[in-house]
Amino acid sequence: MGKRNREPETPRFPVENKICYVLFICQMVAVLSAVSMVYLTVASYVPSLKAIDLGMDETPIMCTTLQAGAAVEDANWTTCGEWCLSKSSGGAAMQIWVQARNNGSTLRFENCTETSYRVCDIFPSIESLDSYYCRKDECKTLHGLFNCSEGICRNVTDWFQCKLDFFEPPRRCIRRIDCFHITGLHFCDNGLCFRANKSYDCEKLCPEIPSKNKNIIALMGDQNVLANCQKVVHIDSNETLWTSELQKLLMISCHIVNISPDKKTLEATDCVDAVLRPLSIFGDRTNFSDVTKIYRASTDLLPSSQSGYQIPLEHELVIFNRTKLHINIEACVNSLRDECREFFGIYGRDGSDYRSPARFPCLRSVIRSDFVVTRFSMTQTLLELILTTTVPMTLFVVSCTLMVICSKLVVVGNDNAHLTFAYLKKKEDAEIALAETDTVANHKII
């Protein structure tokens, strides 16, 4: 005989099951919302109120990295921490010091021809270089010129030539522990590594920059834009600041230069230190080193316009000569995605490896001058504060209110073992009383 399928049993106390489910959900929501409010006190409430009190100015200014490394001066602060709730574990604090200044001019270069763009980094990419890990005892035989960062040395011998001045006793990388945190530009001879002073004289091996028929050279750190343009216009006032009729080469430092698809118009932001040089100073071709040297040595400034406006000099715009850089107001993130390492790789370029220092927008407080940040939005801060306050508090109040209501509506049934609603118990009591009355009446008749 086939096995008969048993029909699912009907719960003996369906009301009690529903009551238990409701109470369980309410208690769980109340506990989780209470715990979240404790966590959000540190993660959201305090930082948000602190941000509001600091009076952050949301108008970006410009920052340039001056110095970066592990505990540059003291270990009492850090640029970026990976977990806001944890305190320092005693490891190296990564710090970045910057100079903060107001923004330069926003310019448009019009009617340009022969536009060219050249990247003159010291190497095409980090991954393309031979890397040696001192922690793995791979640095004991280093020989040549190396760019080192936190114990990882990359061979840059073939990428630039330097006249070096050494200011520290050499590190003997034959002993692995001596080079665990080796950082900076070093010349090594069979594991004996000398760190170069920041005043070293290097030439990037970036030749063959086309300079023929160019009257504009815009420098953007390790990048150059060269073109032959007819005029330069100040975008905000639409005033002409330079024309090709001057028969002079205009050299200028900008943060970003955007080239139009037809390469006839350039738009540049944060432009400072505009100087004039003879058109034929570079000949048909030049190199990055000569461009940089001649630009830095130039003193013939671009004259003021008819209205008196002049492209500003960088030193005239300085707000803070030296201040701390934080990734945000709390100087930490909670993403746990190694965000700080990536941040330090981008903003920690201080020129110690002969790449141009990092230059980037930043934000400052109107009441404090000891730090600037790269990430802040008052709108987002207020939105997060409102959401993190209202959502858990609403859930907590609603769940607690439901539990209080349940305490008034739910009672123990007549069997003293199961829960039921008070109105159902009253109905059951009435039925029992009526049954007892009928029983008594029947007995009397008998």
Image: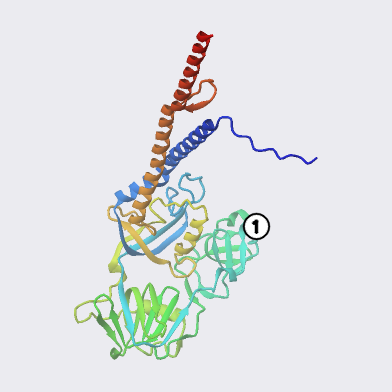
Residue 91 is situated, as x and y percent measured from the top left of the image, at 52, 48
Front one among 432 and 242: 432
Horizontal placement of 305 versus 338: left or right?
left
Front one among 207 and 440: 440
> What residue sits 29% from the left and 72% below the top?
313
* Up/down of 36 relative to 195, above or below: above
The quarter in which the C terminus is drawn is top right
* Up/down of 420 relative to 36, above or below: above
Residue 236 quadrant: bottom left
Horizontal placement of 181 versus 265: left or right?
right
Residue 414 is situated, as x and y percent measured from the top left of the image, at 51, 20
Front one among 45 and 5: 5
* Up/down of 345 relative to 432, above or below: below
SS class of the residue under badge 1? helix
Residue occupying the far right of the picture: 1
Horizontal placement of 321 versus 341: left or right?
left
Judge whether residue 297 can be spotted in this image. no
> What residue sits 58% from the left and 64% below the top?
153
Q: How many marks?
A: 1
> What residue sits 49% from the left and 85% below the top?
208
Residue 83 is situated, as x and y percent measured from the top left of the image, at 48, 48
Mark 1 burial class by Cα count in 10 Å: few <14, some 14-19, many 20+: few
Residue 193 is situated, as x and y percent measured from the top left of the image, at 58, 63
Front one among 14 and 78: 14
The quarter in which the N terminus is drawn is top right
The type of colouring in the image is rainbow
Give, as a three-letter code, the residue at label 1. Answer: Lys
Residue identifier under label 1: 136
Horizontal placement of 184 versus 274: left or right?
right
Judge whether residue 147 can be spotted in this image. yes
